[in-house]
Amino acid sequence: MSSSDDDSQQRFALGFLFALIALVISVVVGTVVVKRVGASGAAKPAPATAVAASAPAVVAAADAASVRVENGVVKFYFASAKADLAAGANEALADVVKGVAEGKKAVISGFHDATGDAALNAELAKQRAFAVRDALKGLGVAEDKIELKKPEETTATGSNAEARRVEVALGA
């Protein structure tokens, strides 16, 4: 009977050892997968430019961040639900920085579209204006030379992408 008990204990110990090894391997593989997915950003939604192959180019461009200078006003356009500045922001702000050095103020106005929750849109417009303000400060503009205007809702006939903007103009 003792050999039967020994066999039973050995089987249990072996089974336990195999289960422990399987658990360790699973944890290691899981950790590697999580690190790779986190590093490559595969778990994040695809950016608008990656969707361009399957969607019309107009849609992808309409939801991408961009910056334009029109009649001396720097206009920052933002992707939906984002407050990230477009590439080229510092270059676009060069004339504003020069105007501030000549004694003028940089006036920042935030806008948002009329879709969704108005309070959340106003807060996002504020965060976008702060991002532009921080870019100006990074370019050496003193905070007392920057004026922030309250976010405004755009109800014009333009698109929602046009409404998601921050404008920087020189004021007195």
Image (spheres, rainbow, N blue to C red):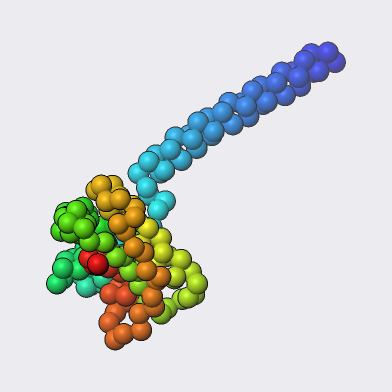
In the rendered view, does 91 fall on the left or right side of 19? Answer: left
In the rendered view, does 103 fall on the left or right side of 151? Answer: left
Taking the spot 34% from the left edge, 53% from the top edge, the residue there is: 143
Of residues 8 and 108, the one nearer the viewer is 108
Residue 23: image quadrant is top right
Tell me if residue 111 comes above or below residue 126 in the rendering: below
Tell me if residue 3 comes above or below residue 25 in the rendering: above
Taking the spot 40% from the left edge, 70% from the top edge, the residue there is: 150
In the rendered view, does 166 fall on the left or right side of 120? Answer: left
Taking the spot 17% from the left edge, 56% from the top edge, the residue there is: 102
Does residue 66 appear in the picture of this structure?
Answer: no
Of residues 148 and 162, the one nearer the viewer is 148
Q: Position of residue 170 (x, y in %)?
A: 22, 65
Taking the spot 29% from the left edge, 65% from the top edge, the residue there is: 107
Does residue 23 appear in the picture of this structure?
Answer: yes
Q: Position of residue 52 (x, y in %)?
A: 24, 65
Residue 88: image quadrant is bottom left
Quadrant where the C terminus sits is: bottom left
In the rendered view, does 67 fall on the left or right side of 37? Answer: left
Tell me if residue 143 comes above or below residue 151 in the rendering: above
Q: Where is residue 154 in the image (x, y as percent from the top left)?
A: 35, 80
Q: Which residue lies furthest to the bottom in this view?
A: 157
Quadrant where the N terminus sits is: top right
Q: Residue furthest right?
A: 1
Of residues 49 and 106, the one nearer the viewer is 106
Numbered circles on residues, count: 0
